[in-house]
Amino acid sequence: GTSRFFLSFEDDMFVIFGGDGLQNILKTFRVSDDMPVEAPQVTKALDKVQLAVEEKYRDIREQILNFDTVLDDQRRVIYKRRQGILFMSPEDTMKMMNKFNEDTVADIVKAQSEEGKVNVDKVLEKIGQF
């Protein structure tokens, strides 16, 4: 058996991945829009477009895998930190929270300071948000 495919040269796949060169050839030879084109050049062009599409999606899948690996690493760090916090003693939890608060206020003051002058109103606003 054989298969026969019908495509439009205006199909997104052709337009995005380089089928416009084939369209130019058809325009040059004044081939009408409703005339079927069966030629080895069309098959080669279609193969090139298909390879380009497959390569593009392979690259996308590879990037997604890389993003997923980074997210998984971050997730593991957060879960480990969370487990440590959940099983801390109340005293250690308070020490950690006090340290976190001190660091955060110091960062706010630093961010709202310019040339040794502290913008007190902004510091109070940001601490209120915190």
Image (cartoon, helix red, strand yellow):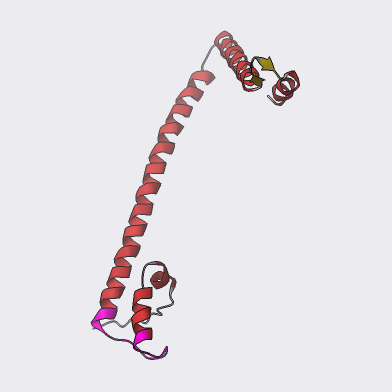
In the rendered image of this protein, does residue 71 appear above or below residue 14?
above
Quadrant of image for the C terminus: top right
Residue appearing at x 51%, y 24% in the figure: 82
With 119 as the anchor, is 86 left or right in this view? left
In the rendered image of this protein, does residue 110 appear above or below residue 34?
above
User: In the picture, residue 49 is in which quadrant?
Assistant: bottom left
Percent from the top left, x then y, of residue 43? 27, 78
Q: Main secondary structure of the magenta part?
A: loop
In the rendered image of this protein, does residue 17 appear above or below residue 24?
above
In the orientation shown, which residue stands out farthest toward the right?
121
In the rendered image of this protein, does residue 39 appear above or below residue 123?
below
With 25 as the anchor, is 93 left or right in this view? right
Quadrant of image for the N terminus: bottom left
| Residue 64 drawn in magenta | no
Judging depth in this view, the residue of 92 and 105 nearest the camera is: 105
Q: Which residues are magenta?
A: 28-42
Residue appearing at x 40%, y 70% in the figure: 13
Residue appearing at x 76%, y 21% in the figure: 121
Judging depth in this view, the residue of 80 and 31 nearest the camera is: 31
Judging depth in this view, the residue of 49 and 4 nearest the camera is: 49
Percent from the top left, x then y, of residue 84? 48, 19
Percent from the top left, x then y, of residue 21? 35, 75
User: In the picture, residue 55 is in which quadrant?
Assistant: bottom left
